[in-house]
Amino acid sequence: MGIKQKIFDIRKNIGKLTKDTANPFFKSKYADINQLIEMTDPLLADKQILITMPIRLGFVVVELTDLESGETMESAIELPQSNDPQKTGSAITYFRRYALKSLLNIQEEDDDANKASGNIQEEDDDANKASGNIQEEDVRPWLTETQFNSYLALINKGEKWLDKIKKKYRIKKAFSTTLESAEKNYKPKT
């Protein structure tokens, strides 16, 4: 079976991404790179497809390699010119996400649109609250990757931000673990 057949089979099992990360600048939501990788890695691994995302000659490249045949498929997007490392880092993350979505033809699903259209069945809240099956909805926004990087830089300078961040944002486990470790293990330079 060639790489194209394997990708075809994988696409049948991917489903849609959920737009779960807030973009405060544009007041919109998107599916972040971590969700995309968590969703696709097991499916790719099952078909013996290796994914790499190198940067080559100013391009973010997403390359899929069939470990059995050696065949490859790739998608590439040219990075914009910038002297600001944070903007470059954000562009790399953004382009990785879009190149992989494009290569695998992945769609995004908007939870709010589904709720409004009635595609998500809502249960009887009173019955669920009475039985203890439902908790109050956490309305805090998700900590974005850009915010995470900014707070991590501050914590790495010895500033105590973790409690404030936890009160203000919902935090993905990987971000939380990294921030907790950075704050716990901070040692001033002597």
Image: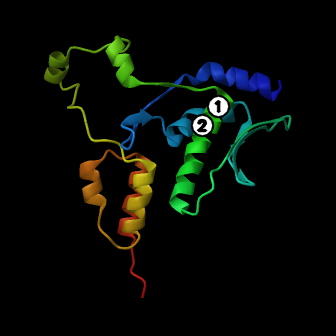
Name the quadrant containing residue 172.
top left
On the rendered structure, is 42 left or right of 31?
right
Rate crowding at label 2 as few (under 14), some (14 to 19) or many (20 or more) other CA atoms within 10 Å.
Answer: many
- Amino acid on which the number 2 mark rests in the picture: Tyr
Q: Quadrant of the N terminus?
A: top right
Instruction: Give coordinates of residue 144: x percent, y percent.
Output: 41, 47
Residue at screen point 79% across, 29% down:
3
Task: Give the numbered dot on residue 32.
Answer: none
Residue at screen point 59% across, 58% down:
82
Name the quadrant containing residue 177.
bottom left
Q: Quadrant of the C terminus?
A: bottom left
Residue at screen point 54% across, 38% down:
38
Between residue 105 and residue 26, name the one nearer to us.
Answer: 26
Q: Is residue 151 above or below residue 136?
A: below
**Does residue 53 show up?**
yes
**Disc count in the image?**
2
CB atoms at circles 1 and 2 under 8 Å apart?
yes
On the rendered structure, is 130 left or right of 167?
left
Which residue carries the number 1 mark? 102
Instruction: Give coordinates of residue 155: x percent, y percent.
Output: 37, 67
- Amino acid on which the number 1 mark rests in the picture: Ser
